[in-house]
Image: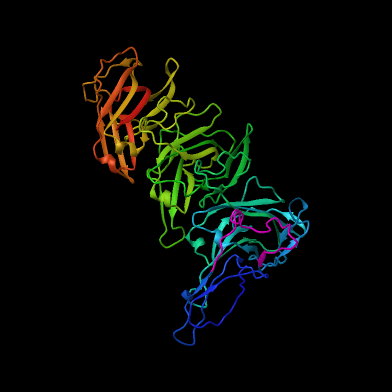
């Protein structure tokens, strides 16, 4: 796979164009890659590398959709497959379902590999490719199992570094692109290596790029079939690959680098597939995915969601508490980390401020699934990312995690209604709403409170500063001259269960109506936290729900913020609160 073919010419000082043609003399042939090097000159002035230009023809339509040639081994030879310390042969009848396969000949060492060079014209920055390689291992003629990332076959790119003005090249750069087998894994049989990679600057600038499958185990014959490196069509309507696991496989999913003590498995629950972690995970070991890149725009809003179950070692359900953000009983959260200039000295990475893009909703569905939802603003890191990694953290120890319905989609800008799920449209779990715990504690509960109307109850608060909140679109805050918050509200004395009356004209904690608070952050630093009191001043009714309205001007601080939360909190510690029909409108 490292071999090169040299064309040598002695050239006087001047400017030159180099091109390739096939045997019939027709110009336009391209071998996959080419590089110019200049040997040490015996006289001055002499030719430099800038004096020779290689003419690269444009690839034909469709050339870059599939980068692997003869991936199904159905050609009359194994060409263009190459080998490294293994030999290569066309295995007649060795492939899937008795078809041909690409096989190695020598298995004496761990370094054997089969591969081929890729057309560098196709490796343009930002393109994403899915890798699929069907692999079978055999020892003494019998199939064997091998499911260890460090000691079993994996697919990688071998990137050649430029000769520049020297007659020596830098060592090849190896990048793993598929190091785990897609689930379900079949013992002693064919299994598929799967992965996804984005063409970053290292790949785009390579003088050559070879795709190879490294065996990593000695004394074992490796056979490949249906090998594919296929371009992923750009579709920014959904940033997650295979989030519903509808094909019953874990394509595009892997475990994160910290997850050494777990494995992944597919599980079918009532006809629906889910991905499960198996083993003894710590709180940071989780499934992961490199999501679509090149889609997110800095400042634009996105909606993230997933369903999950927690299962104990004995098979019984495990539970978490949505009111806790830390500790052993805290619920999982979804995280997104974007990397710019991947693998370069200038590499930078950034996780989303606040630690997550989605938190676990209050409540649990009838079939025992938790749901997590969240809205977030994309950062410049997300927009420019070479790689964006989705993971989970705060996972209960020694508990299996099952995930399904994972999704990240664009969230349209709507300054006329900034609250999500203000009418509590989701009747199983409380999407988007969170407790605000200000050194105390609090819970949220969703139920029918006014006939058939669903609402939110805030209760069990242990500090006046506790309440509920939701993150809203900072762009609307920045554009708005005035904001109008409204809801139907009822207050209940915790000790008696009877409705109580607040005083709209009062601002004290003991008698005043709950204020709206606007908090904003730049990065992880809170910039401002202001409260605004009720403005419609109605006479408060004890018998029903009261119209709560708050129209206010925001100060200049939120104009520079990238996260803004609207909260209702800082009121009498003895009161529980019920809200219906919550709304926040920007008056532009």
Q: Quadrant of residue 564?
A: top left
Q: Which residues are magenta?
A: 55-83
Foreground of the two, 580 or 36 = 36
Evaluate whether residue 540 shows in this view: yes
Q: Is residue 449 left or right of residue 119?
A: left
Foreground of the two, 208 or 178 = 208
Q: Give the percent coordinates (x, y) of residue 45.
A: 44, 84
Q: Quadrant of residue 111?
A: bottom right
Q: Is residue 523 left or right of residue 281?
A: left
Could you tell me which residue is drawn at 44 percent across and 58 percent down? Answer: 341
- Above-or-below relation of 317 to 127: above
Foreground of the two, 69 or 409 = 69
Evaluate whether residue 330 shows in this view: no
Q: Quadrant of residue 489?
A: top left
Q: Give the percent coordinates (x, y) of residue 513.
A: 27, 23
The quarter in which the C terminus is drawn is top left
């Amino acid at each position: 796979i490292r071999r090169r073919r040299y064309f040598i010419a002695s050239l006087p000082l001047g400017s030159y164009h180099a091109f390739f043609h096939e045997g019939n003399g027709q110009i336009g042939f391209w071998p996959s890659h080419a590089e110019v090097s200049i040997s040490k000159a015996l006289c001055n002035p002499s030719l430099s590398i800038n004096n020779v230009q290689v003419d690269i023809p444009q690839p034909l339509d469709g050339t870059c959709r599939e980068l692997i040639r003869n991936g199904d081994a159905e050609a009359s030879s194994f060409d263009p497959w190459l080998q490294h310390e293994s030999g290569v042969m066309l295995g007649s009848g060795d492939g899937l379902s008795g078809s041909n396969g690409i096989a190695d000949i020598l298995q004496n060492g761990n370094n054997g590999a089969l591969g081929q060079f890729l057309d560098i014209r196709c490796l343009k920055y930002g393109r994403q490719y899915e890798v699929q390689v069907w692999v079978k291992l055999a020892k003494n003629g019998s199939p064997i199992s091998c499911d260890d990332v460090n000691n079993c076959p994996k697919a990688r790119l071998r990137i050649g570094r430029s000769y520049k003005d020297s007659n020596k090249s830098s060592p090849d750069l190896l990048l793993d692109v598929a190091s785990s087998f897609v689930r379900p894994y079949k013992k002693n049989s064919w299994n598929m290596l799967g992965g996804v990679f984005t063409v970053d600057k290292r790949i785009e600038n390579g003088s050559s790029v070879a795709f190879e499958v490294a065996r990593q185990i000695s004394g074992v014959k490796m056979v490949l079939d249906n090998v594919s490196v296929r371009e992923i069509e750009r579709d920014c309507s959904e940033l997650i690959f295979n989030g519903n696991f509808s094909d019953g496989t874990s394509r595009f999913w892997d475990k994160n680098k910290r997850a050494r003590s777990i494995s992944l498995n597919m599980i079918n629950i009532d006809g629906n597939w889910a991905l499960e972690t198996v083993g003894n995970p710590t709180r940071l070991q989780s499934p992961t995915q490199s999501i679509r890149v090149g889609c997110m725009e800095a400042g634009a809003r996105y909606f993230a969601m997933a369903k999950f179950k927690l299962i104990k070692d004995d098979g019984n359900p495990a539970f978490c508490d949505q009111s806790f953000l830390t500790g052993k009983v805290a619920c999982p959260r979804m995280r997104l980390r974007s990397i710019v200039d991947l693998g370069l000295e200038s590499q930078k990475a950034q996780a989303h401020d606040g630690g997550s893009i989605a938190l676990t909703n209050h409540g649990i569905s009838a079939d025992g699934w938790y749901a997590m939802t969240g809205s977030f603003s994309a950062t410049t890191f997300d927009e420019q990312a070479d790689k964006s990694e989705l993971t989970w953290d705060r996972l209960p120890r020694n508990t299996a995690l099952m995930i399904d319905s994972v999704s990240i989609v664009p969230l349209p800008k709507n300054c006329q209604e900034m609250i999500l799920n203000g009418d509590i449209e989701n009747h199983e779990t409380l999407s988007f709403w969170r407790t605000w715990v200000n050194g105390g504690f609090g819970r949220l509960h969703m139920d029918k409170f006014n006939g058939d109307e669903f609402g939110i109850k805030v209760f069990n608060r242990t500090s006046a500063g506790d309440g509920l909140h939701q993150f809203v679109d900072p762009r609307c805050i920045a554009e708005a001259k005035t904001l109008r918050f409204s809801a139907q509200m009822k207050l209940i004395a915790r000790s008696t269960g009877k409705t109580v009356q607040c005083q709209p004209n009062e601002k004290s904690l003991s008698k005043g109506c709950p204020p709206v608070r606007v908090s904003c952050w730049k990065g992880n630093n809170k910039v401002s936290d202001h409260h605004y009191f009720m403005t419609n001043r109605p006479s408060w009714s004890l018998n029903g729900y009261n119209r709560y309205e708050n129209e206010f001007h925001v100060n200049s601080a939120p104009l520079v913020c990238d996260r803004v939360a609207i909260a209702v909190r800082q009121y009498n510690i003895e009161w529980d609160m019920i809200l219906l029909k919550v709304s926040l409108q920007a008056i532009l």
